[in-house]
Image (spheres, grey):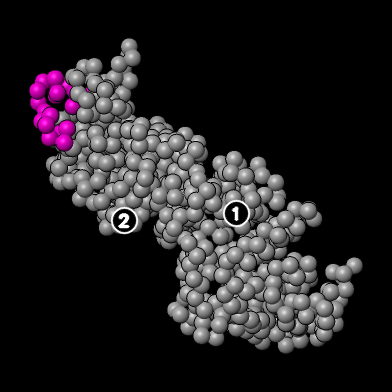
Amino acid sequence: MTVTDAVTETPTTAGVLAALDAESFPRGILDEGSKREIRRATLAAVCVPGYQVPFGSREMPVARGWGSGGLQITLGLLGGDDTVKVIDQGDDDGVNATNLRRLIVDSEHCAQTQDTRDCSVVQSRHRIPEEPLIDEQILVLQVPVAEPLRGVQKSVSECARMHAEADYSMIWVSLYEDLVRNGVITKTTGYPVLVNGRYVMVTTPIPRWDVPRLNNAASLTLFGAGREKRIFAVPPYTRVEPLTFDDVPFEVEGDSTQRCARCGSSDTFLVEAPGGRTACSDIEWCTRTLDGDVDTGSHADRSPLRFLPDPSRRVRAAAAATRRDPAELEARPVPAHTDGWTLAVRGVGKVHGPGGADAVPGTGPDTGTAISPRTGAVVAAWDVSFDVAPGEALGLIGESGSGKSTVLRCLVGEEKATAGSMFLTTVGGGDTDVFGLDAAERRALRVDTVGLVHQNPADGLTMKVSAGGNIAERLTAAGWRNYHEIRDRAAYLLEKVEVPLERMDDPVHTFSGGMRQRVQIAKALATDPRVLLLDEPTTGLDASVAAGVLDLLRKLLAERDTAAVVVSHDFAVIEALTDRCLVMNVGRVVESGLTDQLFQDPHHPYTQRLVAAARR
């Protein structure tokens, strides 16, 4: 053996690494672990259509805005036998489409095509191909913003709650406000849709033209949001309905007179072209149309031409409001229990801190403290019981810290009671303890059974939304879907509470304090609740404004057969609005009776001090 042969046969580090690389499976952008995670998230998204499934999004070697979420889905799904097509705003040869296609092919070693009919996976930004996809194909859409509630709710946890409870009233309010301002819904990309009758999903980035084409589509459609780390899906043959009011037709872009300047098509999505002309957004379809390589008849049947704008069917914004009250809400009878009550409260107590009932001894009016000597907990209220009949108003009065507002928050569901029960005749015939319902069921009661007027109007109103829109929020939560009926009901209620109708479409943050409180009262009465809870309804208002609100409430309560509970520290408010009242001190009821009798002949020393202070 020569020296040269020895050198040749001795393996070098570089040679060993090269041999290992030659024998190993070609590495792509994503490792197999990342791909498995994406596939698992995709399967979960397919099982729950429209639901946003979280996944561990990775950094991708692409510029911001190129669609890292869609790219990761495509890389996770592609195999060696697949053929990929990449389009960007309908163009296969654009810079983004070309670079992404090269990146995908180099990573996954799959075939590529520009013919939609030949691909197994389409990755797209802004468009669904004009060529109808079949059940063996997958459409992947890159999504910049995945959360449909982002525009109306900034809290991530609150968005999750709203999805869980199908609480989409604020999305309906945004559509209502758009109609009020513009007479049409101006939202283009990202139009909200209801998927499979359950989840509201955002359709960004596709235009409204493509939204009807998602409904009962044969192909699987996947949406990927890289920054928000979400995947959601529309499985084949799934119902997808754009959110729209019953009397306001959904519209797509364009009009019946437009034609493509290149191929002459009138049943495709058209975009602006030089010289004031329009052209097909989908370049492949346009070229094939020129070559006679398309089925124009079947394509026209599938195009959303029936959704083209019809000016004769559009609303006329604010001019549509009238003063009539829809027949649906005419004087609903308020059911009463055999004992005569609509609302019954039994032994309600709230302890902040450890100990529960064991913290109660040593607290209350007799000791003059709410702090437990045993546990240090605060006994905010204890053993509070009362009932309210239809058409009756009950008052809870006491100084600040007496526990009256705590009791109200327990009734509303804003705080969990430590002890006691609450019964409504509309829930299980009055035999079901409302405190035993879960949080979602308690919130549902606040839609059409229990109305609440907060001390601060900002707590009960959305300040950037119009007066009519705030009432629409309550009505859409209760299932109202007719735009004109919602406006009629809002106009009727605002007129009832003496808010000028010309202010109906103004944001409530432009209103005075008294007018805001009137709007809040109108919102609370929107669905004609059986029980109305009022927490310090005149606190913070000027004397003259407060007097006007009291007159309004007195008139409204007299007109309705509603059971009302009024919380106030002001005997004048309780005297003006209520029939009976309970006096609370240090978390306990110290005296109760008819309001007139308590005011004229108080027995308990604490009540006597309150009355004396009110008479000064």
> What span is in magenta?
283-301
Quadrant of the rendered structure where residue 607 is? bottom right
Q: Secondary structure at mark 1?
A: helix
For marks 2 and 1, give the CA distance.
36 Å
- Residue 440 left/right relative to 506: left
Quadrant into which the C terminus falls? bottom right
User: Which residue in the protein does label 2 denote?
Assistant: 197
Viewer-proximal residue among 531 and 70: 531
Question: Residue at 17% across / 40% down in the picture?
Answer: 133
Which amino acid, by three-letter code, is at mark 1? Lys
Give residue 496's mark.
1
Residue 399 in percent (x, y) is at 79, 71
Answer whether residue 415 is visible to the viewer in this image.
Answer: no
Answer whether residue 334 is visible to the viewer in this image.
Answer: yes
Question: Residue at 37% across / 51% down in the picture?
Answer: 200
Q: Does the magenta portion include 79?
A: no
Residue 79 in percent (x, y) is at 18, 44
Q: Secondary structure at mark 2?
A: loop
Viewer-proximal residue among 284 and 399: 399
Q: Does the magenta portion include 296?
A: yes
Question: Residue at 21% across / 48% down in the picture?
Answer: 216
